[in-house]
Image: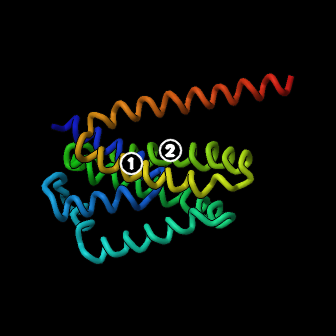
Amino acid sequence: MEIINIFSAFGLSASAGLNAYIPLLTIALLAKFTNLIQLREPWNALTDWWIIGILVFLSIIEFFADKVPAVNHVNDVIQTFVRPAAGAVAFAASANIVTDVHPVLALGLGLLISGTVHAAKSGLMRPAVTATTGGAGNVPVSMAEDFVSFVISVLAVVVPVIIAAIIILITAWIIFRWRHHSDNRSHTAA
C-alpha cells in the first residue's frame, strides 16, 4: 500500500504545480467526506471547515487572476512561491509516510515536483502561448490547466497507478520539448 500512497503523492504534488489550491482542496474534501484519504497529524488540519473555506476562497481568486491578461503573469510570479509549497504539503499529507520517512524528505520531494511543473508551465508553456496567440490563448490554456489539475488530483487519489504513467509521459514530453527548443536555439545562433 505504501507504493500506492507514493503515486498519489506524486500526482497531487504535480497537480499543485498547475494550480496550488485544487489538489489541497481535493485532499481536504476527500479526507473530510470519504475514506479514500486518511490524514495523519498535522495534515488532518486540512479537513477543518475554516481551512476548506480558505482553500475555496483562494481557488476562486487564482481561477480569475489566471484568466486576466497581465494579471496572470503577476499571479505566476506570486505562485512561484505558493505552488511548490502547496506541492510539498500535498505530497507529505497524501503520502501518509511522514512517520515512516523523514518529513523533510517528503516535503522536499513535493517541493521539487510541483516546482518543476510550475517552472515548465510559467517558464516554457505560458510564454509560448502568449507569444504565438498574442495572449488570446491564455484563457483557454488556463482553463485547461485547471481542468487537468482537477483530473490529476482526483485520479491521484482514486486510481494512483495511472498517475505513475501520466507522470512518466509528461516528463518525457517536457524533456523532448526542452531538447527540441535547445536544438532550435543552437541552429538559429549558428
Q: Pointer 2: residues within 10 angstroms few (<14), some, or many (20+)?
A: many
Asked which quadrant contains residue 166, the reply is: top left
Q: Residue at x 25, y 61 (%)?
A: 43
Looking at this rendering, what residue extends furthest in the left direction? 35
* Residue position marked by numbered label 1 in the rendering: 13
Q: Nearer the viewer, residue 68 or 186?
A: 68
Q: Residue at x 25, y 63 (%)?
A: 29
* Residue position marked by numbered label 2 in the rendering: 117
Q: Residue at x 62, y 62 (%)?
A: 72
Q: Nearer the viewer, residue 183 or 112?
A: 183
Left or right: residue 129 compared with residue 81: right
Looking at this rendering, what residue extends furthest in the bottom direction? 50
Residue 164, relative to residue 114: is it above or below?
above
Instruction: Tell which circle, 2 or 1, labels the residue nearer the N-terminal end.
Output: 1
Image location of residue 6, percent across then percent down:
27, 39
Q: Mark 2–mark 1 contact, CB under 8 Å?
A: no
Asked which quadrant contains residue 78, the reply is: bottom right
Asked which quadrant contains residue 42, the reply is: bottom left
Residue type marked 1 = Ser
Secondary-structure class at tag 1? helix
Q: Pointer 1: residues within 10 angstroms few (<14), some, or many (20+)?
A: many
Residue type marked 2 = Val
Q: Residues under labels 2 and 1: Cα distance? A: 9 Å
